[in-house]
Structures are given as C-alpha cells and as structure tokens.
Image (cartoon, rainbow, N blue to C red):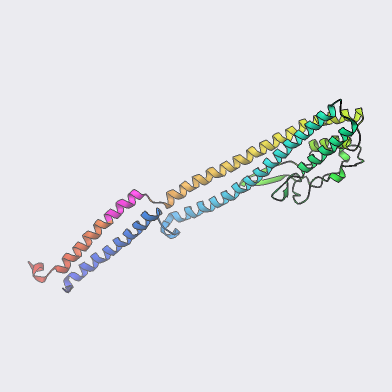
Amino acid sequence: MAMRVATFASSQSLLQAAMRIQVKEAEATTQQASGQVSDDYGGLGSKAGAVVSLQASVTRSKAYEEAANTASNRVETMYNAVGSILDDLSDLKATLASSTASSNTLQESAKSTLESVVSLLNTQLDGRYLFGGSAVDAKPVDIDSIEGSTATSQDQLDYYQGDDQSTSVRVSSSRVISYGVTANDDSFRQALWAISTVANGSTDSASVTNAIDLLTSSISDIAGVQTKLSLDASDLNSAVSSQEDYQSDAADMISNLSEVDITTVAANMSNYQAQLEAAYAAIGKIAKLSLASYLS
C-alpha cells in the first residue's frame, strides 16, 4: 500500500530515528566484542589525547627499563668476576704463606693467578669489555705489560688500556645511575703488583712477606669494590621495578580511558533493541493508516 502524503513526514522522522539507533546498536555490538570504546583514537573523543600521551610514556618507560636491565646484567657479571678474583687472591695468599712451597711453586702459582685475574678483568658481555670505563672495544688490561715488568712500584705498573670515565645509564627522565668499576682501581692495581713481584721472580722471604701484606690489603679493598657493585645492582633493580610499576599503573589508566564497561554496554544494547522495535512498530502502524481511519 502506497505511503500517503499525510503520513510521509512522520514515517521519515521515525525512520531516521531508527537508523540513528541502529548506528548506536552497531557501535555497542563492536564495543561488546572488542572491549574497547573505539577501534581508533577518533572514537575516544576528548580522552584521545590522554590515551596517546600515556601510550607514549609507556614506550619511554620500557626503553628506560631495558637500559636499566642491560646495565644490571653488566653489574652482575662484574660482581661475579670480582668474586672470582677474590678467590684467586685468597688461594695465592695461602700458597705464599705455606712453609713447604718451593720458590718455583710460588712463582708458577703467581703466574697462574696473574693470568686468571687479568682474564677476569678483561671480562666481556655482549662483545663489550666491562672493566675499561667507556673504552668498551679493547681489553682494559695488557698482561704483557705486567709479565717481566721492570716497574719498581705499583704506580709504575703500566697495564691499563681503558679510560677513567664512569659508566652510566639513564633510568628515567630525571635520573642517571653511574655504575661499575675500572681495572685501574687502586685495589686491583695493588693486587696485580703483589702478584707480579712474585710471578717475575721475587721469591725471597722478604718479597713474599711483602706480597702477602699487599694481598691482604687488596683483598679487603676489593671486597669493598664488590660491595659497591652490589649497591649498584640494587639501585638498577630498583629502577627496573619503578618502571614496571609505572607501566602497570599507566596500563590501568589507559584501560579506564579506552575500555568499556561490558555490563553497561549490554544494558544499552537492550535499550537500543527495544527502541528499534518500538520505532519499526510505529512506522508499520503509520503505513497502514487510511484517510477514513485518520478522520474517524
């Protein structure tokens, strides 16, 4: 039956209203399926700027976390290397203090210890030398400068190939952590000097006693270096935890801004469906109206 002119305007108005409700119902269906307010920033309205800013800050936070984790791994490797150096020095000290060890045994033990300690100070991680300051591409300790050295004091022992710049890492927009130690540290220099005197042939009683005293002092100082590395590790781990906490909080904020309340969406969908049914029912009734029924 053809639509009468008298009912056309009412039908069009109801139809447009129904179409608007259909659009809302479709949006609600998508939201219910995805759990998101919108699949693009445009649908977030005034919240879009806050979401974009939070997502960018999370990206920066992850970069800070990764940098701190990398530095933490380096410090852990250095800590373990220093622990092994302490073991080597303690073993050599015990050998030097032994009354039954021959001069040849003392010298060979010192040479072996020297090789081990130098190797540990030349420790690498991911292709990077750890005990050379910012000079990460070359071995920080040159053993050839120690073996057969004619130096008369530890200050003259010219073995260090690195630099004295401290290693640091940015762990937030406002914080930089310096970490690590170089092979040029006085505690290592003293230990290398003590080892080298015996390794290079000074095995008389006075020289051995002096080496033992130097080792005793250097062992104490190197233990302090290890404590320092432990504190560095603690600072870096704390920085990692701080960034992880921020990322978790930011994710919650992004969720609150961009995710929907499924219960609310379900209720809205029910309302939209009821409105659509009412609108189409009204359109159907208008389409059936006749002039006679209109006048009666």
The residue that appears at 87% across and 33% down in the rendered structure is 105
Q: Nearer the viewer, residue 292 or 200?
A: 200
Pick the quarter of the image with the N terminus: bottom left
Q: Nearer the viewer, residue 123 or 115?
A: 115
The residue that appears at 75% across and 33% down in the rendered structure is 87
**Residue 184 makes an appearance in the image:** no
Pick the quarter of the image with the C terminus: bottom left
Q: Is residue 235 left or right of residue 132?
A: left
Q: Is residue 274 left or right of residue 42?
A: left
Q: Nearer the viewer, residue 122 or 255?
A: 122
- The number of discs equals 0
Residue 84 magenta-highlighted: no
Residue 269 magenta-highlighted: yes
Residue 252: percent from left, percent from top:
46, 46
Residue 133: percent from left, percent from top:
75, 46
Look at the image and give the residue range highlighted in magenta.
Answer: 261-271
| Residue 276 quadrant | bottom left
**Residue 63 makes an appearance in the image:** yes
Residue 77: percent from left, percent from top:
69, 42
The residue that appears at 36% across and 54% down in the rendered structure is 32
- Report the predominant secondary structure element of the magenta stretch: helix
Residue 219: percent from left, percent from top:
78, 31
Is 73 situated above or below 94? Answer: below
Q: Is residue 45 left or right of residue 102?
A: left
